[in-house]
């Protein structure tokens, strides 16, 4: 019997099927790799990518796979900037009437969103439903919030706030929410679709930060430290990473090619 050999492409396909049990990639409209961060660390995905590259060299092919070329990186950065502009009313805000805490606004126009109220940095967060509505003629965005879960006595019904051009949120009673600057904020993950997947860098106790990874319905909290010019240190699952922070552009760049963009 004559020995049968699989062509290199078939060998590669089999190798990829084997690796699929280790990590999963989903195609999005941005053509980004969506990593299941609840199960895997970024380091593990990178190692898996190296194994695939090694397998390809073994079968004699030089076709690139999951290699972040500069053109792709620039395209992703441009796309995320456009997404951030679209969601300019999202983010981390300081409430003038409650300066010890913060508010987190997330959601798309004409779709159910939410606002998280925390009156102190270490206090319990309260989520309230929110709907962002955009006037197509003027471009003005208003946020309709049901604040009953937060304070039913003070806010028995719906409250409508206006998003100003500078991104601040103005309330009918004169109260103002101002977007927090610096490294704190809500971020777009360059490898995942926003807002279903989002990354939050929040104030913690003392000099510590709280970094929250929201992946759909799964939420993971970890700790971090703002190192100033040296970047942002984060204790990710099974690894520790330091990202390069560009406060002017509102981005955090990671060693694996991923980048977070602040909304």
Image (spheres, rainbow, N blue to C red):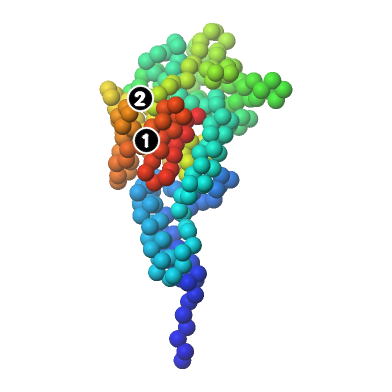
> Which residue is pictured at 44% across the width and 48% down the height?
35
| Crowdedness near tag 2: few (<14), some (14–19) or many (≥20) residues, C-alpha within 10 Å | many
Give x and y (percent) for residue 169: 54, 17
The answer, for residue 68, to whether it is visible in the render is: yes
Name of the residue lying farthest toward the bottom = 1
| Crowdedness near tag 1: few (<14), some (14–19) or many (≥20) residues, C-alpha within 10 Å | some
Name of the residue lying farthest toward the left = 206
Would you name the residue on which mark 2 appears?
203
Q: Which of 69 and 252 is in front in this view?
A: 69
Q: Say if 219 sits above or below 179 in the image.
A: below
Would you name the residue on which mark 1 appears?
244
> Which residue is pictured at 61% across the width and 29% down the height?
109
167 sits left or right of 11 in the view? right
Inter-mark Cα distance, 1 to 2: 18 Å
Give x and y (percent) for residue 15: 43, 66
142 sits left or right of 62 in the view? right
221 sits left or right of 261 in the view? left
> Which quarter of the picture shows residue 130?
top right
Q: Nearer the viewer, residue 45 or 131?
A: 45
């Amino acid at each position: 019997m004559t020995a049968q050999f699989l062509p290199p492409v078939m060998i590669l396909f089999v190798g990829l099927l084997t690796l699929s049990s280790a990590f999963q990639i989903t195609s999005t409209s941005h053509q980004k790799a969506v990593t299941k961060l609840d199960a895997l660390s970024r380091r593990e995905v990178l190692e898996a990518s190296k194994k695939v590259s090694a397998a390809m060299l073994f079968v004699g092919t030089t076709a690139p796979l999951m290699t972040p070329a500069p053109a792709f990186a620039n395209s992703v950065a441009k796309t995320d900037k456009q997404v951030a502009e679209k969601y300019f009313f999202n983010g981390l805000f300081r409430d003038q009437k409650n300066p010890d805490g913060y508010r987190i606004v997330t959601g798309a126009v004409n779709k159910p969103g939410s606002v998280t109220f925390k009156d102190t940095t270490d206090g319990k967060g309260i989520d309230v439903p929110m709907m962002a509505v955009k006037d197509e003629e003027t471009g003005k965005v208003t946020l309709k919030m049901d604040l009953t879960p937060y304070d039913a006595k003070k806010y028995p019904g719906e409250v409508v706030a206006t998003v100003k051009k500078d991104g601040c949120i103005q309330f009918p009673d004169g109260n103002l929410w101002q977007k927090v600057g610096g490294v704190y904020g809500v971020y777009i993950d360059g490898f995942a679709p926003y807002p279903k997947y989002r990354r939050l860098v929040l104030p913690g106790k003392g000099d510590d930060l709280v970094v929250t990874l929201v992946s759909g319905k799964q939420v993971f909290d970890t700790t971090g430290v703002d190192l100033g010019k040296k970047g942002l240190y984060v204790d990710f699952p099974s690894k520790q990473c330091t990202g390069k922070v560009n406060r002017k552009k509102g981005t955090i760049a990671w060693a694996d090619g991923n980048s977070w963009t602040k909304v």
